[in-house]
Amino acid sequence: MRIAPARVGDAEALADLHLDVWEEAYAGLMPASVFAERRARRAERVASWHGIIAAGPSDNLLAWADDGRLLGFSSTGPGRDDPAEGLPPLELMALYVRESVYGTGVGHALCEAALGAAPAYVWVLDGNERAIRFYERQGFGFDGVTKHEDVGLERRMVRR
């Protein structure tokens, strides 16, 4: 496996991966209509990823299998929450891997490549127990803050 920054030519594969991993991660936590609506807007997702990557520099890392399959991705950036809350300045905005590689270390490798040992925070969908356990193993813990999004209740986890 290799981890590398996303390139403009990766936008389509990344958009497809993003659609796939959402369905794998959130099955049973979101209605199927959410996934269908996202799939119906695939072209917009490809264009969005293309624009994000082209704007550079990329804070989006991709995990590639030795055979060239895209296994997962992470996205980091300056925190979007109020800095007055005393949060770390870095936010892990996304970290997803294919279900077929759950428990193999791909997610951990992406997290390490994206954050190292830096303090950071991440929002997790309430009820996503696999993700919660993963982030706890990476040193994150709940800070008691929640927010309601279209997809459901999200809970903030922080690593200091």
Image (cartoon, rainbow, N blue to C red):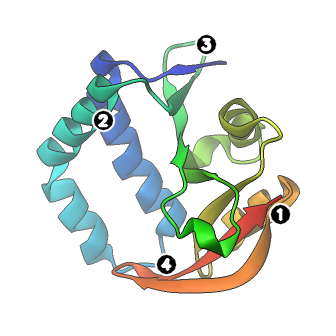
The mark lying in front, picked from 3 and 2, is 2
Location of mark 2 (residue): 52
Q: Residues within 10 Å of mark 3 (few under 14, many from 20)?
A: few
Taking the spot 77% from the left edge, 58% from the top edge, the residue there is: 134
Asked which secondary structure carries label 3, the reply is loop
Tell which circle, 3 or 2, labels the residue nearer the N-terminal end. 2
Tell which circle, 2 or 1, labels the residue nearer the N-terminal end. 2
Location of mark 1 (residue): 136
Tell which circle, 4 or 2, labels the residue nearer the N-terminal end. 4
Location of mark 4 (residue): 28
Location of mark 3 (residue): 66
Tell which circle, 4 or 1, labels the residue nearer the N-terminal end. 4
Asked which secondary structure carries label 2, the reply is helix
Q: Residues within 10 Å of mark 2 (few under 14, many from 20)?
A: some
Taking the spot 49% from the left edge, 78% from the top edge, the residue there is: 28
Q: CA distance from mark 3 to mark 1?
A: 28 Å
The mark lying in front, picked from 2 and 1, is 2
Kind of residue at badge 1: Glu
> In x, y percent, where is residue 109?
74, 33
Q: Residues within 10 Å of mark 1 (few under 14, many from 20)?
A: some
Tell which circle, 3 or 1, labels the residue nearer the N-terminal end. 3
> In x, y percent, where is residue 146?
58, 85
Q: CA distance from mark 4 to mark 2?
A: 29 Å
Tell which circle, 3 or 4, labels the residue nearer the N-terminal end. 4
Asked which secondary structure carries label 1, the reply is helix
The mark lying in front, picked from 4 and 2, is 2
Position of residue 148 relative to residue 106, above or below, is below
Asked which secondary structure carries label 4, the reply is loop
